[in-house]
Image (tube, coloured by chain):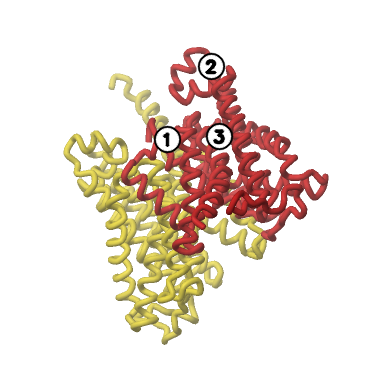
Chain colours: A red, B yellow
Amino acid sequence: MILQLATGGLLLGCIYGLVAMGLSLIYGVMGIVNFAHGAFVMLAMYASYWLYSLAGLDPVIGTPLVALLMFGFGIVVYRLIIGKVLRGPFLARLLVTFGMGIFFVNLAQFLWTPDYRMVQESISHGIIMLGPIFIELPKLVASIGSLVVAGLVYWFLRKTKTGLAIQAISIDRTAASLMGINLERLNAIAFGLGLACAGAAGALLASFYYIFPDVGTMFGLVALVAVALGGFGSTEGALVGAILIGIIETVGGFLVGPEYKYALIFLAYLLIVIVRPRGLMGWGAD
Amino acid sequence: MGGRLMRDNRQTQTIMLIVFAVVGLALPLVARARFAQHILIMIALYAVLGEAWNIMAGYAGMVSIGQAAFFGLGAYVSSFLFVEYSVNPWIGFIASGLVTAAFGTLVGLPFSRLRGRYFAIGTIALGQMIKVVFENWQRVGAATGLMLPLVGEGVANFQFHTTKLPYYYIAFAMLLAVIAFMRAMERSRMGYYFKAIRENEDVASGLGVNKTAYKLVAIAVSAGITGMCGTFLAQYSLYVEPEYMFNHTISVTIALIPVFGGAGSIAGPILGSAILIPISELTRAWLGSGGTGIDLMLYGAFIVLMCVYEPEGLMGMVRRAREKAIARRERRGSTQCPNL
């Protein structure tokens, strides 16, 4: 039973991990805590839903397209908003994404009403048995998809020139800029990439999850907790934190009661951060 | 010279405060419509909440996005005492201030180790957790909450059914009390310690400021005031439920108002509340509250625009205008006596 739950938690954790990775990337490069990240996951889920219901594109197959759309959207948001507050005071940098989150969630509510929607008949459905463990196929597909995208992003950051430049910025912004790295351009790319992660996760989630305006809020909060758990600035930490959270959510939710599952996640965050004020693998400024 | 300037400044402040008090007291006599008075009450209430947040975040540098935890707790303390033990709401009002302050100190102890965004996220976590606890706590009505029984209206019972006016005056009195407290705090050693912790807590602690103690004081005071505001809203709406009292939007609004007005100043939250609350209430009334979300949409857009174009808040605009005026005056002065 516990094994069954832990597997479920692991699968969930992988999806959380992709969301958290985008969050961590954005934070690492430009020091912005993206409180709107959940809202972007939600927008991606709607994009996926509309692509499905208007163009008949399956959410899983449409994932690259949605990720690409969100990448472009991220560049636009960076140019219009984020880039302009980067040199502003701490409070402005902290709250601007809050404002964006509120805006997009309520925009979705305004445009598409608070009704729950769902993608019927996604290509990934059904259950497979792995020894004694049931695995829901859509969740498996989504978590594998998440790992693939996370791997791609990781490869991009480690192996390409642009990726290395992005990493250089998150290590030392001034030095990177002195070496001739164009901060503005790469910040925009990093923000776009962060949103692409949220977008891919949203598209994969859309194949089996209910879609409503507030759906992303919890994903965003959980990803935030995952990033903080792992330590701001550590991409691997974010993935570890997310998987940990997925397991806490399912196993803890079973042991204590499902209504307490999010309370447990937050409790875990508080306990870990109080012992290690910079998270499990964190470094850098507060 | 500097002394005179400060004295002048304080005098202007006192005059402004008196004007503010007179206008504030007279306003509901002019705006007699029930809805207008409702807006005034909300402005005063959120100004107090914004000031309480300001003590913690604007002065002592601990940004909280979970004030609803204190707000809801305060609302529940007095309501529970009233519903279960018929304790007079005024005693409940004091009790909720004390209980939330004690609760703030208790959670503040571990929280004072956290810095910057870890603290902020911690407060979000706190706000979400306490809501879940109250949603599942049968003794306090779980998700349905508590209905406050109607008793005879009057100041003694903290209930008014025929008119909203007394509610407004109570809220406004709370606002004046908080302003008086903050003016005293700004001049006191405590106020300077708070600012020192905000600017750089390591240096402050190196210079002999007991940072944990002062952080706890800031959290306790802020929590206590916020809890009492919770009691006020409970008496105003005569019911409490988790979704209403512990709503995350309350936490966000409480943080936004001072930021919008200008954090770290006394006037900031009042200005912020006086502009943001009517916008939110009026859009909700005009465009329908049927969950269209357009009121909050405007709200979000406002915050973004503010952060991008006026990151110092409205008070930043005021300060710039004043600096410009002083510069102009000095320029004029220097042409008159070029030797000085």
Residue farthest left in this picture:
B208
Residue plotted at (43% across, 67% down): B134
Q: Nearer the viewer, mark 1 or mark 2?
A: 2
Residue A42 percent location from the top left of the image = 64, 48
Cα gap from disc 1 to disc 2, whole angstroms: 42 Å
Which residue occupies 51% across, 74% down?
Answer: B144
Q: Secondary structure at mark 2?
A: loop
Same subunit: marks 1 and 3? no
**Nearer to the camera, A82 or A219:** A219
**Residue B184 vertical position relative to residue A77 in the rendered view, above or below:** below
Label of residue A181 in the image: 2
Q: Tell me the chain of label 1.
A: B
Q: Quadrant of residue B44?
A: bottom left
Residue B326 in the figure: left or right of residue A242: left
State which chain disc 2 sits on.
Answer: A
User: Label 3 is placed on what type of residue?
Assistant: Ile
Residue that protrudes farthest toward the right in the picture: A55
Are circles 1 and 3 on residues that touch, CB within 8 Å? no
Disc 3 versus disc 2: nearer the observer: 2
| Residue located beneath label 1 in the image | B325
Mark 3 = which residue?
A82
* Pointers 3 and 2 in contact (C-beta within 8 Å): no
Give the amino acid type for the residue marked by disc 1 in the picture.
Ala
Q: Chain of mark 3?
A: A
Front residue of B224 and B108: B108
Q: Quadrant of residue B22?
A: bottom left
| Residue under disc 1 on the same chain as residue under disc 2 | no
Q: Nearer the viewer, residue B302 or A26?
A: A26
* Percent position of residue A273, x then y: 36, 45
Question: How far, Cα to Cα, is label 3 from label 2?
Answer: 19 Å
